[in-house]
Amino acid sequence: MPADLVFRNGPVICVDTAYEGAEAVAVTAGRISGVGTRADVEGAIGPETRVVDRGGRALLPGLNDNHNHPMSFGEALGWIDATPAAISTLGGLQDAFRARAAQNGGGWLLARGYDDSRLDIRRHPTRYELDAATGGQPAILVRTCGHLLVANSAALERAGIDANTPDPSGGHIDRDAHGAAVGLLRETAMRLVRDLIPEPTVAQIKSYLRAAGRRFLEYGITSVGEAAISRSEQFRAYQELARDGELPMRVFTMMLIDDTLDSLSSLGMITGFGDARLRIGPAKVFQDGSGGGRTAAMTVDYRNDPGNRGITIYDQEGLNERFTRANAAGFQMAAHAIGDRAITMILDAYETALAAHPRPDARPRIEHCGICTPEHLRRMASMGVLAIPQPSFIYYLGDSYINNFTEEQLSLSYPGRAWIDRGIVAAGSSDVPVVSADPFVNMRSAVTRLTQDGQRMGPDQGVTIDEAIRMFTINGAFASFEERIKGSITPGKLADLTVLDRDPRSVPADELHTLRCDMTVLDGHVVFER
Ligand SMILES: [Zn+2]
């Protein structure tokens, strides 16, 4: 059978040592059917074959962004873009709210992405500063990390938050000297307001996923991990898109354990159910907050912030109980943990769960895995725990990390080098919309450890470009138990491919973020072309 697609004339980064040095690839019926020299695939060219002459551009496996939030990414594309790249001043934020308020029919005004350390005022805006621009309409402004938000007075009023409202467990309401809320809500306190915003319908979620998917494909990303399924409408939206052949990328879904474990396990569902387009992934909990927002759970006080050691969501017993049940039910285990105290608690819980129900190849995951001590590394290696970091946090959030953490803590944060040297599998991801989905900024950060301001955060933890490519291809496939069907350019594997404008191995490390995706192939179909 002649090939549908043939790629020739350029380097092929196979991520499979058996095919190193290949220069041509053939694709037939959604699978990679040939890898080798130009002569090796020449015979596969028939009259209908599309031959892509790459003129020296590199061909890679489709990229894998192993932890992100496609639904909120797609939704946030319709919110006010308050990221530092778009708006860097309080006045600019107010202008954006004013403009949106003028065309808004009284519903919620939503903005996302500000970073207090990058705003001109170098602090969080207050409710009153939002009030000045929102004219009585309820508004929220979510910080870049997603763990803090500022609500205006109309939003606080609707939520019934006043001086008498206690802090909810696992959260904090920032107050002035008289006890009145100033607008900033941390962690679970955000729910007091967020729960008032109508949840999107299945149809809306589907449109968010289509929008997010288009962006992923433009970046050469063909597989993602959906990091937070908590409502039936969300899983239904994914299923309907997959059923109708409209899910733009491959997805595995992390199920938030607190909301879904009982119903999933009572139906006997397990990690891996589904197919190569949509698959049930791990059972996941959130255990702490963010490093930039100083809510990640630490064993010592934050620098210049006496008494603050961050926030934990569950106590040890609660974690042990949940993961023991999830593991026994057949789920891969996953937890959001950034601070060293949170990571210890998660490793303890995984150890307890696996001791109760040993599984040979459990691949438990720690999402983010920010501050990793040598003891953590030892335990992760011996238990086969995977790290799911976001190297581009170093670029986008690194300067606030440098403010919040000591030199020693920074040398242990997102330790790419140490993970690889210890044989710990690290799968790369963006956590979009927390920061941009751009995989090339991500790879540059993994290699150079450069922050936005040009500082180097724990420079000894840099990895090579080949290692960074593995993090965003085969390691991601391994993290969802799919390394046998994708993640490398190997005959027989799914034909998910991306053509980059240059060969990343010959681009200077500091310029890796200037790489562009020129073409994306998913399941043997060209789904994006610049
Ligand atoms: Zn996340």
Image (spheres, rainbow, N blue to C red):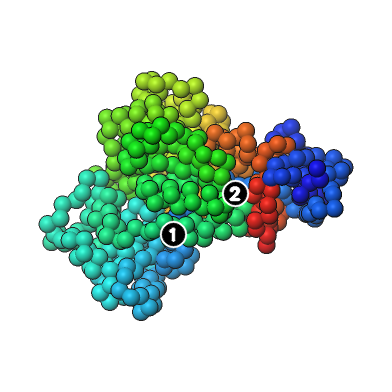
- The image shows residue 219 at horizontal and vertical percentages of 60, 55
Q: Residue at x 39, y 58 (%)?
A: 201
Q: Residue at x 34, y 63 (%)?
A: 141
Q: Quadrant of the C terminus?
A: bottom right
Q: Nearer the viewer, residue 274 or 102?
A: 274
Which label belongs to residue 142? none
User: From what the image shows, is residue 102 above or below residue 59?
Assistant: below
Which residue type carries mark 2? Thr
Give above or below for 197 relative to 309.
below
**Residue 333 visible somewhere in the drawing:** no
Q: Does residue 409 appear to the left or right of 51 in the view shown?
A: left
| Horizontal and vertical percent position of residue 66 | 52, 44
Q: Nearer the viewer, residue 245 or 100?
A: 245
Q: Quadrant of the N terminus?
A: top right
Q: Position of residue 171 (x, y in %)?
A: 25, 49
Q: Secondary structure at mark 1?
A: helix
Name the residue tied to disc 1. 203
Compare marks 1 and 2 and give the one earlier in the sequence.
1
Numbered disc 2: secondary structure: strand
Q: Is residue 286 above or below residue 131?
A: above
Label at residue 222: 2
